[in-house]
Amino acid sequence: MDASTTYFIIASASAFGGALLKLLYDSKCSHLNICFGCVELERDIKSEVEVEEHKHQERRPSNHTDSLENNSA
């Protein structure tokens, strides 16, 4: 096996692992069972959900409805 094949396998495994970790982080499951029960995780997702809701509220302009009402009058 040459060096380029080894680098490709390591890079592919790293990308797969990173994608799997991102998927697990983004999921809102409170109980995770990975590798047929070898790894079990319990997560407190209540605080994560509150943080996500706060981020969505910051992105939404608060005066959007006011400007719509002023334009219709």
Image (spheres, rainbow, N blue to C red):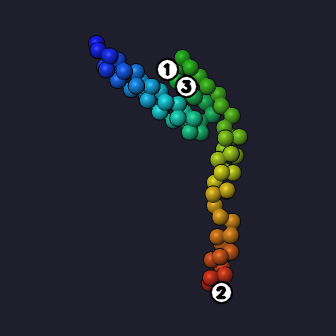
How many angstroms separate mark 1 from mark 2 (CA)?
A: 62 Å
Residue contact between numbered discs 1 and 3, judged by CB atoms under 8 Å: yes
Image point 68% across, 45% down: which residue? 51
Q: Secondary structure at mark 2?
A: loop
| Residue matched to label 3 | 33
Using residue 26 as the reference point, say whether residue 3 is left or right of it.
Answer: left
Q: Where is residue 59 drawn, in percent x and y?
A: 63, 57
- Nearest the viewer among 6 and 22 is 6
Residue 56 placed where, x, y %? Answer: 63, 54
Amino acid found under the numbered disc labelled 3: Asn
Residue furthest out toward the left: 1
Of labels 1 and 2, earlier in sequence is 1
Q: Residues within 10 Å of mark 1 (few under 14, many from 20)?
A: few
Res 36 label: 1
Instruction: Pick out the residue farthest to the front.
Output: 3
Name the residue that disc number 2 marks.
73
| Image quadrant in which the C terminus is located | bottom right
Amino acid bearing label 1 = Phe
Q: Is 28 on the left or on the right of 66, as rendered?
A: left
Dot 3: element: strand
Residue kind at label 2, given as amino acid type: Ala
Q: Position of residue 33 (x, y in %)?
A: 55, 25
Element marked by disc 1: loop
